[in-house]
Amino acid sequence: MIDRYNPDLAAAISESVEQKTLGWEVNVSPVEINLPEMAVQHGYDLVEQWSRLFLKENTWVQQSLGIPSLFARIDASLDSDGNLLPYEIEERPGGIGAATVYNPDFKGRLAELRQSWPDFQVVVSKERKGHDDALWADVVSLEDARPDMLCLVRAEPEEQEFHPLEPSSISSLKGKGNKMYGVQMGLWKPISSQDSLDWDRPFALKPVQGSKSRDVRLWDPDNHRAQGIATRTKITETLQRHGVMYQQDYIPPIEIGNNGKTLYMIHRVFYGYDLPEQKWKYIGGFYNVRPSLIIHGARDTIFGPVVPNGSS
């Protein structure tokens, strides 16, 4: 595992403060982290590749700009040399609103970038249990959505009542969470049989289409007791249920220790599209720290700001 941070920094991150954001209890650390410049530049390369390979849809953003979304989030680890190790690229990521609260630098960069974007509304499904979009955009229900306005849809692909909004969408809609791009980028490969799995090596399995870490399974034969590592039975059952999944080489998160307790960190950083310049811009984001190797926005997750170099 990677030991990137000293104990004092690990302890400082662990001294997070619980905050309430739209009714959610969120553990927030004030410790700012910068991505190494080589990681930022690698992120640009990844987003450029991804934007060409993501599933094509009849959305406004695809038809008008030739990109899948006005923004993207790279979820990644770092190796000991500061190289970016991507888990995946989210084309319709959550966490934007929350990031504006616990990362003021991100809030300012996002606001500057949005000046180049057309106005849009966020149309949220009643089936969603929570979202943070009210912290950064205008949120409406499907019934109250303006038909003459662009939109960011927060609904699952199977909610067909939202499909008529496709021509107005600034991000994915039917293709939300589609991971086919990663096959061509060399990030993972399709697996349809447990006989194709090498149980002697660590790996991750993820659905062909999905988000929020649903049905993501980790396997590590040398660390099988770690929180977040699935059993062979669970992995086999999940693969059989899906039929086809994507297998990715296991990417260890950044390991930090605090008073004998192992914590794991990943970065979630955003790139937004600048319309006048027609290029992507890195605007920072946040890191997540958790005692589990499955790192997402759970109750025991710590959030902290990732700011671009040169930020105050």
Image (cartoon, rainbow, N blue to C red):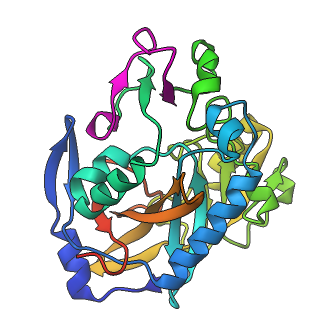
Was residue 199 drawn as part of the magenta stretch in this picture? no
- Where residue 312 sits: x, y (%)? 22, 76
Whether residue 154 can be seen here: no
- Where residue 232 sits: x, y (%)? 66, 55
> Which of the 4 image quarters holds residue 59?
top right
Q: Residue at x 82, y 52 (%)?
A: 191
- Where residue 297 sits: x, y (%)? 37, 49
> Which of the 4 image quarters holds residue 187?
bottom right
Residue 14 or 50: which is nearer the viewer?
Answer: 50
Q: Check the image and name the residue furthest to the front.
A: 276
Residue 312 or 21: which is nearer the viewer?
Answer: 312
Q: Residue at x 71, y 73 (%)?
A: 201
Whether residue 109 can be seen here: yes
Residue 83 to residue 230: above or below = below
Q: Is residue 121 left or right of residue 172?
A: left
Tell me where the magenta segment starts and ends, as one range.
133-153
- Where residue 87 sits: x, y (%)? 59, 63
Residue 193 or 19: which is nearer the viewer?
Answer: 19
Residue 238 to residue 5: above or below = above
Was residue 141 drawn as part of the magenta stretch in this picture? yes
Residue 285 to residue 245: above or below = below
